Image (cartoon, helix red, strand yellow):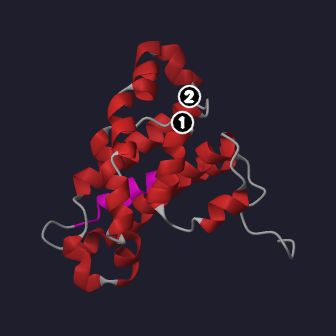
Amino acid sequence: MIEGHKYPGELASPQQIHELAGEYRKAANLLLQLGRSGKPLTRAPFRLTAIHAIELYLTPLLLHRGHNPNQLRKMQHDLSARTEHALVVGLRLRSKTAKHLQSLSQNREYLITRYGPELAATASQINRLTATLEEVAAKVTVLIGLSPRLQQVDPAAAREVQGRDSATSLSAATAK
């Protein structure tokens, strides 16, 4: 039972939220397989789940780096705001990815995906959304220290995931 003054997730650890994000990512990948070419609405469940997974991946990074859960809740589903904060606390994204996260918010894709079937064909490309999800998942996982297996198996890959394109990420953040 939820305490009267607590919001769901307010007491969750960054690791718990990261695990939840991983489950949404897995679900998004399964839903992607159900979409049909030429039928944008069949991709809506994938889009919604992928966008939610991205939001969930950014959350544990921000919590891990000291943000208050109440501050994050006030951001609602604004991926642009979450991304800006994540860049400040060390997330380094490819320029295309940072711009895509901004466009997801500016174009209101979260709402379009949920409530705007007439606008389904105007949403971002599936391969771009997939790439954004995968990059955010990999880099956040490294930053919050939940990938010791990757670091043990391939230390160079772990460093690349964490540090790649830091200059383009910073330039994308400051270009706003």
- Where 13 sits versus 143, above or below? below
Question: Bounds of the magenta span?
Answer: 24-35
Residue occupying image coordinates x 71% and y 57%: 69
Question: Can residue 45 be spotted in the picture?
Answer: no
Q: Position of residue 110 (x, y in %)?
A: 40, 70
Q: Residue at x 75, y 69 (%)?
A: 7
Q: Position of residue 145 (x, y in %)?
A: 61, 29
Q: Is residue 136 visible?
A: yes
Secondary structure of the residue carrying tag 2 is: loop
Q: Which mark is residue 150?
A: none
Does 153 sit above or below residue 116? Answer: above
Residue 45 locus on image (x, y percent): 37, 70
Left or right: where 150 falls relative to 64: left
Q: Is residue 111 left or right of residue 56?
A: left
- Figure quadrant of residue 66: top right
Q: Main secondary structure of the magenta part?
A: helix
**Image quadrant in which the N terminus is located:** bottom right
- Are there few (<14), some (14-19), or many (20+) residues within 10 Å of tag 1? many
Q: Is residue 127 above or below residue 118?
A: above
Q: Is 86 drawn above or below residue 106 in the view shown?
A: above
Residues marked 2 and 1 touching at CB (< 8 Å)? yes
Amino acid type, callout 1: Thr
Mark 1: which secondary structure? helix
Say left or right for 129 vs 15. Answer: left
Q: Residue at x 50, y 58 (%)?
A: 81
**Label 2 sits on what residue type?**
Ser
Q: Which residue is mark 1?
A: 141
Label disc, if present, on residue 147 of the rendered structure: 2
Q: Nearer the viewer, residue 49 or 59?
A: 59
Any magenta on residue 117? no
Residue 27 is covered by the magenta coloring: yes
